[in-house]
Image (tube, rainbow, N blue to C red):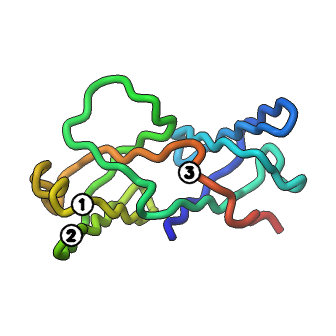
Amino acid sequence: MNTIEAKVKEIQSVENLNIVKFDFHKTTLIMMSLELNKDVKIESKIKLSTKSTHIGIAKSFNGDISYSNQLKAKIINIDSGKLLSSVTVKVYDSLLESIITKESCQKMNLQVGETITVFIEANELSILEILND
């Protein structure tokens, strides 16, 4: 499980749908949720989570895409098996793991030390923990 610590900066709600914006090192992350804990408020410190299989990777990305969360990251490790590759990246002070097919990893010719873009859909982020005292 990947985790990111961020601070809530905006909450938009219509009926049961919530769009929550977070500040992550002056980068905005967006989460879409049908349920929101009543203790989540503006300025709350939050630990967000997402699964490794929900993090996409692009190399030399330039263009528009519907993924709300796009972060520049540096590849620090690649571990390839027979079918899948685990790509560990560093984004600011957070380590994230993306599980992609070995074929995709080879096609993109991913290398340790490269800067890439990671993508996380807004509906794939969730609040794991509220960190406020």
Q: CA distance from mark 3 to mark 2?
A: 23 Å
Q: CA distance from mark 1 to mark 2?
A: 6 Å
Q: CA distance from mark 3 to mark 1?
A: 19 Å
Q: Which dot, 3 or 1, sits closer to the camera?
A: 1
Which label number is shown at residue 35? Answer: none
Residue type (three-letter) at the residue carrying disc 2: Leu
Q: Nearer the viewer, residue 114 or 19?
A: 19
Residue type (three-letter) at the residue carrying disc 3: Glu
Image location (x, y in percent) of residue 41 = 83, 47
Residue under numbered circle 1: 101
Residue under numbered circle 2: 83
Please give the name of the residue rendered at 42% of the width and 40% of the height, measured from the top-left corner.
Answer: 70
Q: Quadrant of residue 46?
A: bottom right
| Circles 1 and 2: CB atoms closer than 8 Å | yes
Image location (x, y in percent) of residue 131 = 74, 66
Q: Nearer the viewer, residue 30 or 55?
A: 55
Label 2, secondary structure: give it: loop
Left or right: where does residue 86 sit relative to residue 23?
left
Pick whichever of labels 3 and 1 is earlier in the sequence.
Answer: 1
Label 1, secondary structure: give it: strand
Residue under numbered circle 3: 124
Indicate the quadrant containing the C terminus: top left, top right, bottom left or bottom right.
bottom right
Farthest front residue in view: 83
| Circles 3 and 1: CB atoms closer than 8 Å | no
Image location (x, y in percent) of residue 95 = 41, 65
Image location (x, y in percent) of residue 30 = 60, 40
Q: Is residue 116 above or below residue 3?
A: above
Q: Which dot, 3 or 2, sits closer to the camera?
A: 2
Pick whichever of labels 3 and 2 is earlier in the sequence.
Answer: 2
Please give the name of the residue rendered at 18% of the width and 63% of the height, measured from the top-left corner.
Answer: 102
Pick whichever of labels 1 and 2 is earlier in the sequence.
Answer: 2
Q: Is residue 132 above or below residue 110?
A: below
